[in-house]
């Protein structure tokens, strides 16, 4: 893993991905969501974005997701479906979401039937107060309802509950909404709810988590004790092995192999070593379960995004290192299953950073969290408004987010 990577900056089309969960909160798949930055920001779907659309999937991490057996859902309008664009997705993983709009049966029915016979799944969104055409109901493997737009209407919803396929609840923002949707017989769930802490009663930290938090304390102190830190890393066989493997990789090109932790600290420098250690410790705390690892990857992305943004924009004079730490720790409550107010007590952070992590109102960092959430949730209208209010260029935001995403995914791909 190189210290810095750069996603293509010449592209006006930008993509993000959202996880889709099953009723057990396991990741079922991801949806690819896109926009185009051109005289503002506009939703885009394959066919509008030219050749950049599917190449973008590389740094969005779709290939890695498919290798893990996850489904990939992409929205297409009628023209895109009739043009055969969904066939760019592998049939074993592809889910074609039919975007809302006029859908004459004579034109669309045959194309959807052919996609299903070729192994693709079809997802159709239910629009409030708009009965679903019979031909679409027959072809749909998944029926979706956006809870962010409206609560399912009893008469219409009763009809779709009889559907034999999956019911997908989109726009699920809280754990309470997730539980309510489960009770309404939804089987798939999409939204920001997974970023909330799922409280575990009487949650106690494991020995591995305690060790990692102690290392954070050593690193983040006002006057770090380098000898104590080196000793702590040396005492952790796994951490020592990963650090030496990282430094002896081709990315650094040292003329001789690094053979000790003390030598690593001397050659790499404290700031670079600290950035690497922060990321590795967070990944270790997430463990092997896929949802905590998804949260860890998102935390890495947030930290790098805020750090790079602070170097590209003179944003209120914020320190890049502080912003990296804020993004890195922003989902630690969800990763650990503990309230954030308890998490911050375990870390040597200043009062302003603790307030930011607890999302206290009127905190100076709050607009940055909102930027991240709009990017992650593909809330393009809200992103455009906030970027304008903050005087931050949309193209710059896209480039920084893509760079941060590539860095975070590369971290996991190479095992750091």
Image (spheres, helix red, strand yellow):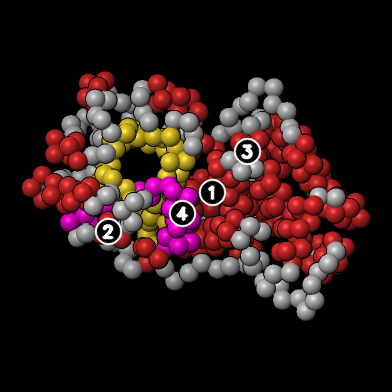
Residue picked out by circle 4:
67
Q: Distance between the residues labelled 3 and 2?
A: 36 Å
Assign the N terminus to one quadrant of the image. bottom right
Q: In the displayed structure, does residue 129 sit left or right of residue 252?
A: left
Specify the segment rendered in magenta. Answer: 56-82
In this picture, residue 270 sits left or right of residue 111? right
Estimate the spatial distance between the alpha carbons at disc 1 and disc 4, rounded to whole Å.
27 Å
The secondary structure type at the circle numbered 4 is helix
State the residue at coordinates (69%, 46%): 284
How far apart are the alpha carbons under marks 4 and 3? Answer: 24 Å
Residue carrying label 2: 87
Q: Which residue is drawn at 42% across and 45% down?
A: 29
Q: Position of residue 333 (x, y in %)?
A: 64, 35
Quarter holding residue 294: top right
68 with respect to 292 (left or right): left
Tell me the quarter of the image containing the C terminus. bottom right
Relative vertical location of residue 169 with respect to residue 118 in this rendering, above or below = above
Camera-side residue of 210 and 145: 210
Report x, y in % for residue 409: 56, 57
Label 1 crowd (10 A; few <14 / some 14-19 / many >=20): some
- Total labels: the figure holds 4
* Disc 2 secondary structure class: helix
Res. 335 mark: 3
Most foreground residue, 194 or 222 = 194
Say which label, 2 or 1, has the lower sequence index. 2
Comparing labels 3 and 2, the label whose residue is closer to the camera: 2
Mark 4 or mark 2, whichever is nearer to me: 4
Report the residue marked by disc 1: 372
Give the mark, 3 or 2, whose residue is nearer the N terminus: 2
Mark 3 Cα-neighbour bin, 10 Å: few <14, some 14–19, many ≥20: many
């Amino acid at each position: 893993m190189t210290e810095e990577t750069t996603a293509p900056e010449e592209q006006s089309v930008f993509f993000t991905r959202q996880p889709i969960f099953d009723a057990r909160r396991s990741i079922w798949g991801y949806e690819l969501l896109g926009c185009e930055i051109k005289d503002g920001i506009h939703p885009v779907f394959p066919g509008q974005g030219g050749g950049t659309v599917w190449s973008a999937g590389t740094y969005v991490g779709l290939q890695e997701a498919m290798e893990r057996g996850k489904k990939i859902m992409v929205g297409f309008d009628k023209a895109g479906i009739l043009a055969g664009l969904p066939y760019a997705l592998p049939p074993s993983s592809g889910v074609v979401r039919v975007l809302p709009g006029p859908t004459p049966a004579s034109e669309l029915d045959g194309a959807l039937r052919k996609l299903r016979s070729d192994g693709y799944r079809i997802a159709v969104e239910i629009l409030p107060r708009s009965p679903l055409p019979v031909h679409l109901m027959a072809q749909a493997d998944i029926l979706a309802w956006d809870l962010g737009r409206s609560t399912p209407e009893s008469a219409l919803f009763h009809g779709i509950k009889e559907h034999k396929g999956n019911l997908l609840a989109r726009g699920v923002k809280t754990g309470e909404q997730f539980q309510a949707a489960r009770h309404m017989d939804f089987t798939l769930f999409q939204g920001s709810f997974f970023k909330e802490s799922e409280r575990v009663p009487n949650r106690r930290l494991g020995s591995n988590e305690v060790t990692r938090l102690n290392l954070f304390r050593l690193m983040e102190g006002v006057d770090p004790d380098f000898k104590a830190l080196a000793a702590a890393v040396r005492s952790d066989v796994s951490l020592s092995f990963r650090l030496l493997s990282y430094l002896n990789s081709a990315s650094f090109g040292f003329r001789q192999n690094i053979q000790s932790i003390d030598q690593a600290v001397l050659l790499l420098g404290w700031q670079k070593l600290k950035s690497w250690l922060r990321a590795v410790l967070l990944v270790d705390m997430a463990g092997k379960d896929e949802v905590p690892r998804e949260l860890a990857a998102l935390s890495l992305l947030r930290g790098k995004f805020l750090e790079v943004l602070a170097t590209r924009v003179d944003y209120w004079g914020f320190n890049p290192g502080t912003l990296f730490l804020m993004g890195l720790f922003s989902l630690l409550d969800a990763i650990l299953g503990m309230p954030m107010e308890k998490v911050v007590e375990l870390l040597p952070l200043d009062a302003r950073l603790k307030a930011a992590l607890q999302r206290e109102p009127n905190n100076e960092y709050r607009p940055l969290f909102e930027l991240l959430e709009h990017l992650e949730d593909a809330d393009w209208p809200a992103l455009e408004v906030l970027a304008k209010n903050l005087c931050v260029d949309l193209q710059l935001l896209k480039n920084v987010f893509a760079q941060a995403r590539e860095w975070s995914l590369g971290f996991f791909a190479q095992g750091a």
